Image: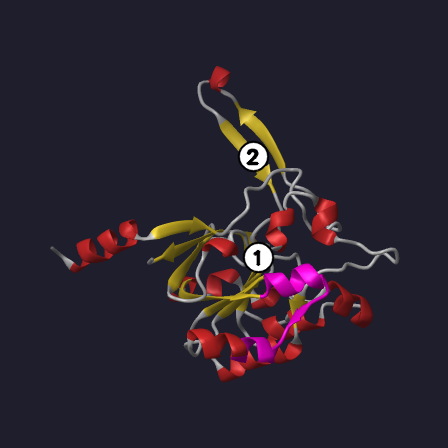
Amino acid sequence: MTQADTILNALKAARWVDLTHQIDSKSPHFPALPALEQTDVFTLKDGFHVQKFSVVGQYGTHIDAPIHFVEGGRWLDDLPLKDLLLPLYVIDKSQAVAENPDYELTKADILAFEAEHGTIAAGAFVAFRSDWSKRWPDQDAIRNLGPDGSQHTPGWSHEAIDFLVHERGAKALGHETLDTDSGQAAARNGRLVEEYYLLEQDIYQLEVLANLDQVPASGSLIQISFPHWHKATGSPVRALAWVFD
């Protein structure tokens, strides 16, 4: 048996979890962006079926490259392919979010996670599980606007991002909401301060993840794929977790 056979058998024996939402024209998205458009260019009556998709990069479960917010940052095609296959850690704060939709994941949460599951290894992908994805595909539930029009949604604290990037050497972060920042932090600041900060650290992120409740805290892998765009700031992705139960 070759090394390739051994790896293939191990991957096929693993439990595969799709971490992405299926997208269509009704999928929740940042309201300033247009919805996906899907049309037939040719049908089988013409002898073959060809479709045209018109979709912004930041749609559905998607990847943000640093250039999305940061002038001079890396584009998607600047990311090394090896950075798209990473150890996956999932920090579960879904109960805290259920009690407080404005919850922000903290450094203390990360340290508590490590006390139970071990230190997060350098070069990892760290995901914030909030179970917000269970609100999909309801746009209103995903945004969760209050009477003043601001979102009541969970997000990352500055200290958590700083700790994971600079103390743990994380390669990428991910979450289930539309934004890195909590809705209330974005309202207070008038902009997405933490999303800018994260991308300014020259790492990428995945937004609008799904099915994190099917992945253990540690011990799995995440693999991310998207078209080989030229100079793209972001793209819808297919992200898979390989879980070695």
Report the magenta residues as a range.
93-111
Q: Residue at x 48, y 80 (%)?
A: 168
- Report whether 50 appears left or right of 149: left
**Which element is circle 2 on?**
strand
Res. 57 in view: no
Check the image and report above or below for 231 versus 202. Answer: above
Residue under pointer 1: 234
Q: Amino acid at mark 2?
A: Lys
Question: In which quarter of the view is residue 36 placed?
Answer: top right
Give the residue at mark 2. Answer: 52
| Residue depth check, mark 1 versus mark 2: number of the one nearer the observer | 1
- The answer to whether residue 234 is above or below residue 125 is above
Task: Name the residue rendered at 61%, 75% in the picture.
Answer: 200
Residue type indicated by callout 1: Gly
Farthest residue, direction bottom: 167
Is residue 190 shown above or below 58?
A: below
Residue with the most extreme left position: 1
Q: Is residue 209 above or below residue 195?
A: above
